[in-house]
């Protein structure tokens, strides 16, 4: 899967630089450039300011540091030719490189308009995540929980999909609106933790990986819990940058870590965990306090512990570090 080119016949701009680009934007004309910048939505203040500076300089003055320009691409890649033939449309492509480098997101433009966004895997991990996201969208659309008009295809045996542009903005959203969106994924089934499919999945993984300390914490959590919890369609990576505010309301996207039989509260904890840790820089103690204030439930310690165990499992599967999550888990169970 690696080695595939996604360029179209255009002039490109690499951000933050050509050597290690996060995004590679088609900037052949002003309209194209304006559309291309929509694929890049950083949340850190530094990255936001950098994006504004580059966008303003390029679109208004057609000038930018030459070190971040790529060379002009003189022809469409084989993949773009495939899409041109499939839709009988001439596409311009901008490319977003995922943090884990397991996939790319490709913005397709035609005649000054955004046609949609492609998600394409570039390694085995990306392939697994893309297949899971296709499954998630199909299930949620069938249940009427989600309204995303997905088109799935294969290129040389590799599955990928295209989604139309979500008309809206990624922005700071009031907590009550975020909670309302999470509630829409709730099912009618309520179970004790010891019966929850998500808990059983985590336990099986900890057993398989021989994670004794984490397994002991899980068993203690399950034993002490007396509450019933809803089974939900779990997004898995519920964070501000995966939510769009549209005219119709909030819409979630990026369902790569979807769980069909998820556990209530894990998504909303993920949301406040990401805000507190990545945007506010809180340490383990401050973050636990932050989440406890945001989510007022009786068994907050137990549910946050399960969330952290789920994150440890997910990080291991994605070959990422989970040192912070382990430290926080140990802190609240000390």
Image: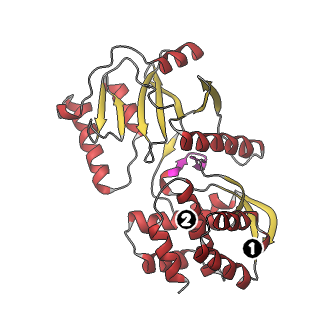
Q: Which mark is residue 193?
A: 1
Image-based side of 111 in relation to 257, left or right: left
Is-magenta flag for residue 77?
A: no
Q: CA distance from mark 1 to mark 2?
A: 18 Å
State the image quarter where residue 28 is shown.
top left
- The scheme the figure's colours follow is secondary structure
Q: Secondary structure at mark 2?
A: helix
Picture coordinates of residue 298, whole percent (x, y): 66, 83
Q: Is residue 66 visible?
A: yes
Q: Position of residue 245 (x, y in %)?
A: 53, 49
Q: Sequence order check: which comes first, mark 1 or mark 2? A: 1
Residue at the spot 77% in from the left edge and 42% down from the top edge: 142
Is 192 drawn above or below residue 21 in the view shown? below
Residue 192 visible in the picture: no
- Is residue 250 a member of the stretch shown in magenta? yes
- The reply to whether the C-beta atoms of the residues labelled 1 and 2 are less than 8 Å apart is no
Q: How many marks?
A: 2
Asked which quadrant contains residue 57, the reply is: top left
Pair 1/2: label in front = 2
> From what the image shows, is residue 295 above or below residue 119?
below
Give the magenta part as a residue range.
242-255
Q: Residues within 10 Å of mark 1 (few under 14, many from 20)?
A: many
Front residue of 319/243: it is 319
Give the answer, above or below, for where 92 lies relative to 235. Answer: above
Q: Which residue is mark 2?
A: 312
Residue shown at 46% from the left, 25% from the top: 109
* Residue 334 location (% of width, % of height): 53, 87
Residue sitting at x 59%, y 32% = 160
Please tell me in which quadrant of the rendered image residue 11 appears. top left
Local packing at callout 2 (Cα closer than 10 Å; few below 14, some 14-19, many 20+) is many
* Residue 297 image point, x, y percent: 64, 79
Q: Nearer the viewer, residue 90 or 121?
A: 121
């Amino acid at each position: 899967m690696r080695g595939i080119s996604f360029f179209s016949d255009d002039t490109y701009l690499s951000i933050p630089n050509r050597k290690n680009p996060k995004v590679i934007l088609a900037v052949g004309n002003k309209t194209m450039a304006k559309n291309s910048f929509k694929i890049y939505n950083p949340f850190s203040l530094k990255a936001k300011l950098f994006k504004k500076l580059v966008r303003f300089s390029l679109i208004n003055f057609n000038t930018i540091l030459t070190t971040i320009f790529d060379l002009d691409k003189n022809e469409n890649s084989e993949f773009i030719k495939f899409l041109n033939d499939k839709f009988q449309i001439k596409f311009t492509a901008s490319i977003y490189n995922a943090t884990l480098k397991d996939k790319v997101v490709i913005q397709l433009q035609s005649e000054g308009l955004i046609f949609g966004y492609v998600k394409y895997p570039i390694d085995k991990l990306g392939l697994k995540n893309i297949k899971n996201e296709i499954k998630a969208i199909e299930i949620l659309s069938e249940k009427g929980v989600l309204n995303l008009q997905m088109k799935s295809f294969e290129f040389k045996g590799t599955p990928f999909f295209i989604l139309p542009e979500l008309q809206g903005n990624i922005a700071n959203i009031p907590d009550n609106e975020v909670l309302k969106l999470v509630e829409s994924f709730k099912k009618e089934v309520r179970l004790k933790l010891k019966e929850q499919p998500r808990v059983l999945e985590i336990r099986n993984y900890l057993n398989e990986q021989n994670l004794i300390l984490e397994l002991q914490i899980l068993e203690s959590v399950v034993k002490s819990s007396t509450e019933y919890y809803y089974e939900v369609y779990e997004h898995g990576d519920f964070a501000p940058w995966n939510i769009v505010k549209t005219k119709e309301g909030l819409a979630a996207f990026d369902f790569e870590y979807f769980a069909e039989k998820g556990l209530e509260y894990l998504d909303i904890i993920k949301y406040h965990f990401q805000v507190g840790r990545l945007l506010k820089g809180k340490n383990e103690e401050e973050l636990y306090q932050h989440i406890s204030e945001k989510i007022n439930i009786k068994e907050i310690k137990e549910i946050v512990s399960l969330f952290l165990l789920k994150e440890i499992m997910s990080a291991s599967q994605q070959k990422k570090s989970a040192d912070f999550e382990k430290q926080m888990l140990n802190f609240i169970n000390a």
